Amino acid sequence: MGIMECVRNGIFYLDGGTGTWLHKRGLRPGELPELWNLTHPEELIALHRAYFEAGSHAVCTNTLGANALKFDGREGRPTVREVVFTAVECVKMAREQAGGGQTERFVALDVGPLGKLLAPMGELPFEEAVSLFAELVRAGADAGADFIFLETMNDCYETKAALLAAKENCSLPVFVSNAYDESGRLMSGTPPEAMVAMLEGL
């Protein structure tokens, strides 16, 4: 059964938090969580396996902030591709090791905000944002992710950049989640209704 058929079949469970769990396991303040895919893969595999065994249909890769603004391969830093391939492999290994009766288990490439505001609110050009997301998406698709999960996006323009990058660089299904404030709007002031309309248009 494919991911879309599984979703339409009834309730679909994602996993829980990754960053909070890593902090409990020793992630230091300011340390990039995505590096743990390379330095502590056994910790990630154990976490992913626990989520699968708890009933998650899909587990997200530890790639929320994996982009070339942080991982450019310079001065000993890994590349985006290295981080993503290792992260996807951790989820795949957890899926293979997981017990329990859950039969449908998927790998979600987790894609989060870039950490910089897009122009005109910030200085990051829209086209550069699309390019940064595209590199991550291509790596995830090549590594064998089952779908793309755009997570906790808080700007409609950045969400659009990530979605365009996903659609233009792979054929995988794309899921989108946004983070709204107490007023029910994104950081950019967009209400859910407008966000849904934009996403449907894309």
Image: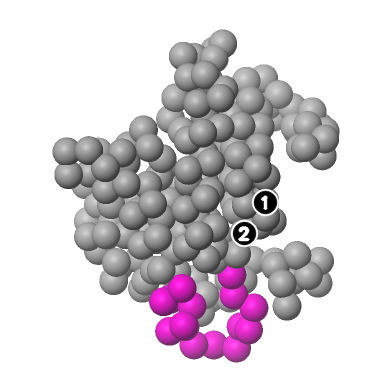
Residue 1 vs 166, above or below: the answer is: below
Would you identify the image quadrant in which residue 97 lies? Answer: bottom left
The amino acid beneath tag 2 is Phe
- In this rendering, would 185 be left or right of 80? right
- In this rendering, would 26 be left or right of 157? left
* Percent position of residue 193, x then y: 81, 32
The amino acid beneath tag 1 is Val
- In this rendering, would 41 be left or right of 59? left
Quarter of the image with the C terminus in it: top right
* Front-most of residues 53 and 132: 132
Quarter of the image with the N terminus in it: bottom right
Q: Secondary structure at mark 1?
A: strand
* Front-most of residues 20 and 142: 142
Q: Which label is found at residue 174?
A: 1
Q: Dot 2, crowdedness within 10 Å: few (<14), some or many (≥20)?
A: many
Q: In the image, which residues are magenta?
A: 92-106
Contact, mark 2 vs mark 1 (Cβ under 8 Å): yes
At x 29%, y 66%, the residue is: 41
* Percent position of residue 72, x then y: 31, 39
At x 26%, y 42%, the residue is: 73
> To which residue does mark 2 refer?
147
